[in-house]
Amino acid sequence: MELLMERVTFGTDEFPIKVARSANGFVRRMTRSGKYKDFVVKGEMNIALGPGFPNEYCGPHIGVRYDSRLWMENLKRRAKIYKWEYGLGDKAYIGCPEIITEFKGKTANLDADQIHWNLSLQHYRGRVEHLISELVKSRASLNTRWRGSFSLLAAVMKISAHMVGLQERMRVPKYDVFVPWPVYPYQ
C-alpha cells in the first residue's frame, strides 16, 4: 500500500438495479440508462477501504444520472468527509475533488508508472466491487428485474445494504488493515 497515503480512507461505486419499463413517459426517460442499455435505478456503496466494511449506502437514484454527478450533488454525504480524506473511484468519478481515479487512456499510451498506478488502484477498488457483488447477486429481489413499487424497492435496497454490512462485520475482515487507526475491534 506504499502508493496510497493514509488519507485514502474509502472507496465508492454505483451499481444498477433493473426495473420494469414504466407506463409513465417521464419515469421511462429517467430510468432508461444509456450505459446499461436498460431501465435501471442506481444505488451507491461506500466502504472503509482498510477492512472492506461498508460504511455508507445511498439510493435509489434515477438511472440517467452518471456517477460523478450523483457524487457532487449529494452535499449531505460530502459534508461527512473530512477535508484531508480521499477515496478511490473508477474513471466515472473524474472531476470529483475527493476521489482519486485511474489515468485515462489506452495502455499503449500510458507510461510504466501510470500503468502501475492503475493496476494498484484497481486492486484496492476491487474491494468495493466485491461488496456490491455480494449485495446484488446474492439477493433475488435485486438481481432480477424489479416490478413492484419504487418505495418498496427503496426499502429492499436499504435493508439489503444494512444486512450486507452486518454480515461483513460479523466475519473476520477479508483484507489486511493498513490505516494507522484501529477499525476492527478484534485486532
Image (cartoon, rainbow, N blue to C red):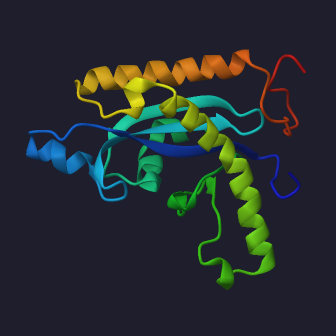
Can see residue 83? no
In the image, residue 134 sits, relative to residue 83, either above or below, namely above
- As rendered, which of 149 and 134 lies closer to the eye? 134
- As rendered, which of 80 and 173 lies closer to the eye? 173
The residue at 78%/27% (across/down) is 173
Q: Where is residue 20 in the image (x, y as percent from the top left)?
A: 22, 37
- As rendered, which of 139 and 176 lies closer to the eye? 139
The quadrant in which residue 183 appears is: top right
Q: In this view, does 174 lie to the left or right of 82?
A: right
The quarter of the rendered structure image containing the C terminus is top right
Q: Where is residue 81 in the image (x, y as percent from the top left)?
A: 62, 40
The residue at 70%/19% (across/down) is 169
In the image, residue 128 sits, relative to residue 123, either above or below, namely above
The quadrant in which residue 118 appears is: bottom right
Number of residue marks: 0
The residue at 18%/51% (across/down) is 29
Q: Position of residue 168 (x, y in %)?
A: 67, 22
Q: Position of residue 9 (x, y in %)?
A: 72, 42
Can see residue 20? yes
Q: In this view, does 79 lie to the left or right of 73?
A: right
The quadrant in which residue 79 appears is: top right
Q: In this view, does 179 lie to the left or right of 72?
A: right
In the image, residue 13 sits, relative to residue 91, either above or below, namely above
- As rendered, which of 106 and 117 lies closer to the eye? 106
